[in-house]
Amino acid sequence: MTDEQLALAYIDGNNRAFDLLLSRNQSKLYSYILFVVHDRDTADDVFQETFFKVITKLHQRKYTTSGKFGAWIMRIAHNVIMDWYREQKSEKIVEPTEDNDLSNISSRDLIEGSIESQFVTEQVLADVKKMMNMLPPTQREVVFMRFYQNMSFKEIAEMTNVSINTALGRMRYAILNLRRMAKQHDVMLQFNNVYA
């Protein structure tokens, strides 16, 4: 059964269907939450709150099969994370300007080929991951969705409930911040078709 069929089966009273949904989706969802909130205890709380909301919405029959179940629960997780940040007021979320100009972003090819270049690429990716942890939550989130989950900007915009321009703007600011940090730490960054 698909996740969508399992969700409908759970709505109709099949509790085992929910167990299957949880086992299929928990790893991907938890890694997304942990990547964004950057704290295991907080990630545990957000994960539990997300599934509480998922269960509640399923019981209230607020789920329709018009989209993928995985995207639906990711959207719920995103909302729970944003609520948590609002409550904490720990970081100021930077939003892109309205006249967001993306023309100065160019893409480069990733290094491929020899063992040496593969090693360099792996080291760069490890360095980038460390730097990504220093980005504001909304920028970290869009980078994670784009690079680690291969989502389109349309999907990112839908999941985070913002316009495509806002999602693009967040990526732009994330890349600018990553480049600035890379320059400070003498790390070579190469982005491959970020906006494709």
Image: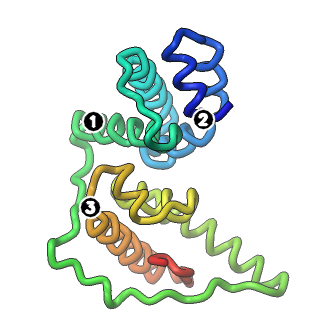
Instruction: Quadrant for residue 165, please give it.
Output: bottom left
Q: Are marks 3 and 1 in contact (CB under 8 Å)?
A: no
Q: Residue furthest right?
A: 115
Q: Which residue is mark 1?
A: 83
Mark drawn on residue 163? 3
Looking at the image, residue 160 sits to the left or right of residue 33; the answer is left
Residue type, numbered disc 3: Ser
Sequence-first tag of 3 and 2: 2
Residue type, numbered disc 2: Asn
| Residue 153 locus on image (x, y percent) | 41, 65
Q: Secondary structure at mark 2?
A: helix
Instruction: Quadrant for residue 109, please give it.
Output: bottom right
Instruction: Name which residue lies at 51% across and 43% down.
Output: 68
Instruction: Quadrant for residue 3, please give it.
Output: top right
Callout 2: 10 Å neighbours few (<14), some, many (20+)? Answer: some
| Residue 125 locus on image (x, y percent) | 62, 70
Instruction: Name which residue lies at 59% across and 29% down.
Output: 5
Q: Residue furthest left?
A: 98
| Residue 169 locus on image (x, y percent) | 29, 70
Nearer-the-camera pick, 153 or 81? 153
